[in-house]
Amino acid sequence: MLELSSNRHNPGIDPALHAWGWEIPVYLFLGGMVAGLLVLGGFHILKGRNDPHAEAYPWAPMLGVVLLSAGMGTLFLDLSHKLYVWRLYLTFQPTSPMSWGAWILLLVYPALLLAALLHPPETVPFGDAVLARAKVWSRWLRMRPRLVQAIGAANLLGGVSLGIYTGILLGSLGARPLWNSAILGPLFLFSGLSTAAAALHLLSMLSKRQVKGQFGDALLGGFFKLLDPKAGGEAMLRADTSFLTIELGIMALWLLGLLTATSVHREAAALLLSGDYAPAFWALVIITGILTPLFIQTAELSGKIRHTAAPAVLVIIGGFALRWILVSAGQTSHW
Amino acid sequence: MDAPFYKFGLFGDNASLLVAFVIGLGFGFFLERGGFGSGNKLARQFYFRDMAVLKVMFTAIVTAMLGVFWLSRVGFMDLSQVYLVPTHLGPQVLGGLVLGLGFVVGGYCPGTSIVAAATGRVDAMVYMAGMFAGMVMVGFAMPAMDGFLSSGDYGQVTLAKQWNVSYGVLVTLVVFMAVAAFLASEWAEVKTGSRELTSQPLLGMKGLTRSRGLMLAFIGVGVVAATAGSPYRGHDVRVNEKELGQMVSRQADHVTVDDLAGRLIAGTNVPRLIDLREPGEFGRYHLPGAENVPMATLASAQWRADESVLLYSGSDAHAEQAWLMLKARRLPQVYTVEGGLDAWNDRVLFPRLTENPAPGEVDAQKRKVAVSKHFGGTPRGGAAPGEVKDAAMSLPPPPPAEVPAGGDAAPKKKAKKEGC
């Protein structure tokens, strides 16, 4: 008997399109963290012309460059036709988030490098000659306050664009109801800000470790002593607390939006809230990544418990889990 | 509400993972707060200088034991649903020795090493790395150890069964053992000079410290347990194999569907009819006058000692199992409907008629049609008046709860039967 399968029993109609593997969530995580570093750095430059604490994180822009390169590396690995990557830069398509992303990623590099040049580190383990030349340029830059402000503004703007773009990249895909919300832009921006603040906080905590001659401590302390941030991590702790709170609020809005939309969107939200991704989402993103660090940080800020690197590590785990789960669950959700 | 919640389907697999996460969070938190994140503190245990580990473990064991016992005893929890690790004596003795050795040398047991690592202790991280490396090695060595690991299988052993005492008595014994251990460890701590007994008196009573108050509470709740009966639900039953075997071989354990149909129509000598299927199936169709008692609830159903019970399900299996259960409860008159509802449908509701019945079979054929019509069915085949050949076997709507008292077919049939 010849049977025509004209509905969704046909596997070709609803293909399980898990086209994105590990590369995309890793890139979204790194890109988000770089966006956060840009915003925090740009804000400090703009605010701190006369503020000694403005020089708090000389390594933040450098860290940004490294992470951005790693993130773009994963994007490159994801490309099917790697040799044609240059073609992205022959055109600009204002309606394509991909095109926006390609150009934003390119333009963010000079902003990060200039910010790094504004605050060169005191010493580097090698390359003293390069550092000396950089310091000459740094002095030249810092004598021009308007230029410094422009660099700060470029960092801030670049960071916001990059952070929002990573969310819009997913949000513009109408075929995936879980992602199909413009609020993913701000969500990823604030998640990126919280992971960036956590990363800086982590660096400041680790670099404060006393070298006591014990094996592990000596290893970590000796390495992080190089980073030598001048201010404590308290500012980052405060910033992180507000970012996490805002992130939680935006996430609630996003899920509420899905739950009050069509049944397709409700099913998509149920993937995270009660479905197959629920254990990971609740355990890793909400409890580990947001609520626990919020709880610990609040206790730390009110002086009830000692400052540790623990909340920073948890926030970074949560930020990564958010991208990973969202990319996997989104590819499962369908019309 | 019934515990264990997961086994009773209160939540699914996904929620169970989340519950596990939250429990783990609490477990880790309290281990750390109990001081178990410190290898030094744990190691002091073995020098009798700081007995916190022993006290915490015994408190946890006694609290959980009393909780499980009493929650089961009052019917909130079904203890038979709690998994018991089977006993493999040799492998478990060896495993215990390996764990103890690692504990003494490294200062951590698996759980506390994770807690300590989470608080940033490098020694615990190294310990954890060793633990996971060991797991990988054991994983690879598994095929070689398979014979040893499954040796000495004693099944699910409990001390109560082993010693033939009641669970309540065992609970009391463990409570006394724990309290003795508490007192001994306090004594040891004072003896080794690592602690002075300076606790606050409880309720203004001198000599009654908070920990001693806890011990008294344990003793109180534990001693009552000795007389409280078994925490397990259900009953252990005995059957008389010989008697049951004879009943089955005499075919005294069942009635046929034709016999049942006759009794229902006559309205006399109808036993209590029990439908063992699920409520949904029962709702679609059931025998006239039947009660719905699904298999899972059979154990809690109430019976009069002298009543006669007729069990049926879709086919034979469930009815026969239920028959054994009720016989084990000493009900004298329990029967099954042979072939169950399948046979009822096949022979009573939708009987097959032959095309040209022999003269002697005409009456029987007519009776079949009448009986089938009486119960709302349709005969198949044959030349019975007013019926469709090979009609779809659609079940009639479920009959009213009572047995129809004297339908119009009943007296006719009765008369015919007498005529034969």
Image (cartoon, coloured by chain):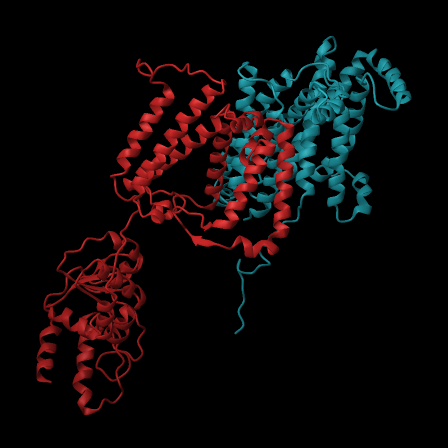
Q: Nearer the viewer, residue B259 or B232?
A: B232
Which quadrant of the structure image shows residue A40? top right
Q: Nearer the viewer, residue B285 or B211?
A: B211
Q: Residue furthest top?
A: A50
Q: Residue furthest bottom?
A: B359
Which quadrant of the structure image shows residue A312? top right
Q: Is residue A211 above or below residue B363?
A: above
Q: Is residue A263 visible?
A: yes
Tint of chain A = cyan
Q: Is residue B98 above or below residue A317?
A: below
Q: Name the residue located 23 percent from the left edge and 62 percent from the top edge.
A: B398
Q: Is residue A262 visible?
A: no
Q: Nearer the viewer, residue A55 or A224?
A: A224
- Chain letter matching colour red: B
Q: Is residue B326 left or right of residue A240?
A: left
Q: Name the residue located 8 percent from the left edge and 79 percent from the top edge.
A: B415
Q: Position of residue A103 (x, y in %)?
A: 76, 34
